[in-house]
Image (cartoon, rainbow, N blue to C red):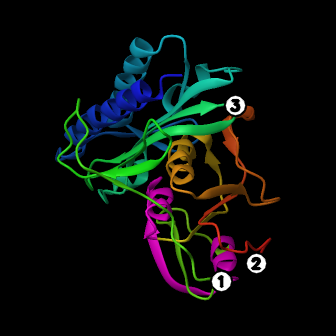
Amino acid sequence: MDYTSIVSTIRKLALEAGDAILEVYNREDFDVRAKSDDSPVTEADELADKLISAGLKAAFPEIAIVTEEQSDTHDVAASVFFLVDPLDGTKEFVKRRGDFTVNIALIENGVPTRGVVYAPAKDRLFYTGGDGKTVEEAGPFAKDTAGDVKPLSVSNPDPSALVVVASKSHRDQATDDYINSYSVSEFRSAGSSLKFCLVAAGEADLYPRLGRTMEWDTAAGQAVLLGAGGKVVRFDDHTPLTYGKNIYENPFFIAYAPGIELKKSA
């Protein structure tokens, strides 16, 4: 597997998709429609999906692709495939909060081994390098050449004063109860897969998700976190969160920096 080529390609496609998304985002108005599951979708989602899908097919025709916007057409039994959320955080996009991301991951035998998370409205770009280690690149972002990068590593958490990050759009009582079972010194709120990236960058220690997510929501963020030394496990039994599951649906999960003794429940 030519990981250097894969990383270069998915980085470039994420940046190009980000440009297309911002073109829509910066308009005075744009259409928002509801999908079959009542989740929102915009022209930006569809433009980014087409751009990324076409780019991956052209560069790596031998690797299957699963994307959120085309998930109904996929039946992938492959051990290696790309998993794409062209615009994660559509609710944040519609509300013009800026906490939305482009996510592209490579899945190998159920594990996200390479990934890129790009937040175009926040100018933050995270990805795993060819060596599998995570970096954050400083802008401005040239499409064909990476700029200055900073290696990322998770925090060395203090169990008596944890920094916890959770969703802006999906907070509920169960999540709050679970968070309150820890000794928390600071709470941070972020949208989309940026929560994984904050843990990867050492800006947070713990991200619990007690709600429905799909694999394309989490794969790239998990790759970024794993490459920075973090872990992502199922909430129920604390085994690693894996990919290629039935209908691409995730169980509840916990993303964290090692050193935290995980609670089973609130």
* Residue 139 position in % (x across, y down): 20, 50
Asked whether residue 34 is in view, the answer is yes
Q: Residues within 10 Å of mark 1 (few under 14, many from 20)?
A: few
Mark 3 or mark 1, which is nearer to you?
3
Q: Give the left or right position of residue 15, taking residue 259 as reference.
A: left
Name the residue beneath numbered marker 3.
109
Residue 196 lies within the magenta run? yes
Mark positioned earlier in the residue sequence (1 or 2): 1
* Residue 148 position in % (x across, y down): 24, 49
Callout 2 amino acid? Ala
Residue 266 is marked as 2
Q: Is residue 70 above or below residue 86?
A: above
Q: Give the left or right position of residue 111, taking residue 226 as reference.
A: right
Callout 3 amino acid? Asn
- Label 2 near label 1: C-beta < 8 Å? yes
Mark positioned earlier in the residue sequence (3 or 1): 3
Residue stretch in magenta: 174-203
Residue 104 lies within the magenta run? no
Name the residue beneath numbered marker 1.
180
Alpha carbons under labels 3 and 1: distance apart:
35 Å
* Residue 63 position in % (x across, y down): 55, 17
- Label 2 near label 3: C-beta < 8 Å? no
In the picture, which quadrant includes the N terminus?
top right
In the picture, which quadrant includes the C terminus?
bottom right
Mark 3 or mark 2, which is nearer to you?
3
Per the image, label 2 sits on a secondary structure element best described as: loop
Mark positioned earlier in the residue sequence (3 or 2): 3
* Residue 201 position in % (x across, y down): 43, 62
Alpha carbons under labels 1 and 2: distance apart:
7 Å
Q: Is residue 234 above or below residue 107?
A: below
Q: Residues within 10 Å of mark 3 (few under 14, many from 20)?
A: few
